[in-house]
Image (cartoon, coloured by chain):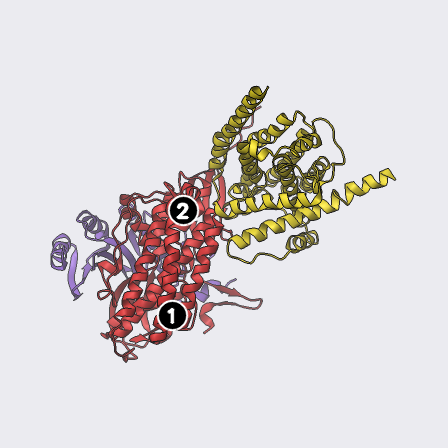
Chain colours: A purple, B red, C yellow
Amino acid sequence: MDAENTFETVHLLLEDWAERFETPDPTRLEVYMKHVDDLVPAVVGLRVKKLGYLAAIVGLDPGADTEELEILYHFCTQDLMIILRFRVPKTDASVSSLCDIVPSAESFERELCEMYGITIVGLRNPGHLYLPDDWKEGVYPLRKGVDPRIAFQNN
Amino acid sequence: MEEIIERKPFEVTVGPQHPALKEPGNFQFTVDGEIVTNAAVRLGYAHRGIEKAAEERNWIQNIYLVERICGICSHIHATAYCLAVEHLANIQAPPRAQAIRVLVSELERIHSHLLWIGVAAHEAGFDTLFMYSWRDRETIMDILEKLTGNRVNYSTNLLGGVKIDVDGEHKTGILKGLDILEERTKHYLNIVTTDAFFLQRTRGVGTMTQRQAEVMGAVGPTARASGVARDVRIESPYGAYDEFRPNLIIEQAGDLEARFIVRVKELFESYRLVREILDRLPEGELSVRMPRRIKPAEYAMRVEAPRGELFYFVKSNGTDKPERVKVRTPTICNMTTVVKLVVGHQLADVPLILAGIDPCFSCNDRMVIVRDNRKIETIESRR
Amino acid sequence: MEILLDFLRLLIFPGGLFLLLAGLLYEWADRKLLAQLQNRIGPRWFQPIADIMKLMGKEEVIPDGSNKRLFVWLPIAALAGGLTAALYVPIMGIKPAFNFTGDLIVTLYLLSLLTLCMGLAGSNTMDRFSMLGATRTFTQLFSYEAPFMLALLGPALVAGSWQIDKITAYTESHWLIFTQPIGFVVVIIGLMGKLELPPFDAPEAETEIVAGALTEYSGRGLALFRLGKGVEMVIGLTLVAAFYLGGVSNPVLFLVKTLALLVVVAVLQAVLSRLRIDQTVGIWWRYGALLVLVQWLFMFLGQRLTL
């Protein structure tokens, strides 16, 4: 399937759940999704149509003074990339786990969870992946404005 | 009165210090006799907070930072980063620079695979193969030292091009070294496919079907050994790979033997590519100017590291420092396969199954907590 | 006077001190040969001696949960077993200090005592790696013991005696390597199993279970075990040389023959990769035992035919 066909299929699949579609490059399709609850059905749809494997989950913090975090799910097939973009509120950020559909998502989600403080609902091994076990609760290193050193201040 | 003795499962912890691991990682295996019944992994022993650190360094400083994520794949990390940043700035490095980047990438791949053959043989208890392949690894390291000035961690990338040039003397040296290595590699291919004792340890061990590999998200030679046709250099060529095309090396068996064969055959493919590049190296400059500040944009770059697909996400915000750098290394994808595959195998096969994915824990982890008696510092504050 | 000479023979030469030194020098020869085969340089001649001296000087750490007395006495028992076995074996071509009917069996069992002590030392330690190593040591002991012993008893049968020096008197004129070639192959491989040399080093597979049964040993205990292993190597090589390679009647022949055997053993070590413990057991019980029985069959037929 070439770029046009693939992106066409993605359009049709996700148009109910997407706010807008953007193609900054001929090989990249950015899908700005309306609501984070649509994650699982969207991914199921992509998998069923064999529209790419999950390459990475990237967390973004637009700034220390903003209210929302962004999560990007990158699906790659051949030389094309389909990126699903979701926004979650910083306080009480939560998203469903993909590990039932895509087992490799588990490690990515664990990292997202501990680095950004996003609760992944349905994660089988919710423990830390990279951070030490005695890391201070509530300190999310990759959020903007967070200095990881405060995790050690009371030691 | 009978006492009910609770049968607790016998747990063998491998790591963080263990002779089988060249880098620290923690694996918890539950065994019944010699058979593994459950496995869990815990990483982070070499985590250095690189993604956070990258946000506080400028674009050029970050090249040096990402080079040090890993010793064996340092060049490919820097290449991915530079390609991504160049895309953000809408700059293309000149053809000669792209070709030299690919040349060093392939030489690095050769080095990595030779190192891996030795390490995997050592895990199997075949020390002689370990010693021989590491002796040959000296040849490639000497080549790289003459070319780049260092045996490991070559630091050839600049934003906008490369620092080093390839002249006639380099060319003859490389070609001579490759001839020696090719002879030796033929011998290794013979060993991994015909040595009876070695095959007993690798044939039919750690088998992963194509379906399993696809579902579990395996990448790189591990996936190609199970019949999954995934190679970023071929499906999404970057840099000079559309000029110098590699062939897809794929095996169907999916066991450890297949993983050995795929990597050895990739060595031959790399030798061929290096010779081709040296033959048709384009003329031209080595680098172009890059702006100091880069306007806001995002890009995701995929490259083929020796271990599999390496994913870089870079976001700029108009300043001279990146907004976000995300590194997703191949080993984290393949680690899931280890944890699922070892169940049902004997404990003796575990080091070999782990070595089969060519794990690079340094690539994975990106936090060193430096404690001295008086205060606690992180690597952050040591700038 | 006799008693003094006896003491000298027991404690200094050819038993005791000399034997310990010989064990270490043979260990060096093995490591050096292996290194050269692997395109390396290898250690200098005094390396094993230096290792032992260093270990003797180190602090011995007794892990929690293990029986202290056993922990300390097992290495001593192991070395004692090895040294006692040497009393009946013609080291350096000199007639053994003691001999009696059946001393071959006693020697073999004293050598097994050494392996047994190592296995017990592993099970005594409350550590997952040592316990796994101990299990493997015992498993390996049970598998190679039968074929190895049968292969050594083959010469005893044709010599018509269970006494080592009577057997060597017979083998000096009959080179059994030619008349019992299968037995020779089995005994060499059995020796490698006994000494836990690759490919049969699953009990101390460094990349899997750290150091097997001896993982928690350090200092004096480890030194004694290593000395025991060296002594075991010398005795094993002597027995094989004496039985199959035409006896060891003088020191020069002793050195030449045992070192020749060591070269064969080193080559096998370099060329073969480690076997899993289940594969080792499989090989022993399937091929080892079978080959030895075939050998014995030929021997019996041979005796029948010549009668």
* Element assignment for label 1: helix
Would you say residue B140 is visible in this rendering?
yes
**Relative to C111, does residue B257 appear above or below in the rendering?**
below
Would you say residue C62 is visible in this rendering?
no
Mark 1: amino acid:
Gly
Count of all numbered marks drawn on residues in the image = 2
Residue C200 percent location from the top left of the image? 52, 41
Residue C296 percent location from the top left of the image? 55, 25
Q: Which mark is residue B353?
A: 2
Q: Rate crowding at label 1 as few (under 14), some (14 to 19) or many (20 or more) other CA atoms within 10 Å.
A: some
**Relative to B227, does residue B375 appear above or below in the rendering?**
below
Mark 2: amino acid:
Ile
Task: Give the residue number, with chain letter if any, for mark 1.
Answer: B173
Left or right: C198 with respect to B72? right
Q: Nearer the viewer, residue B199 or B228?
A: B199
* Tags 1 and 2 on a common chain: yes
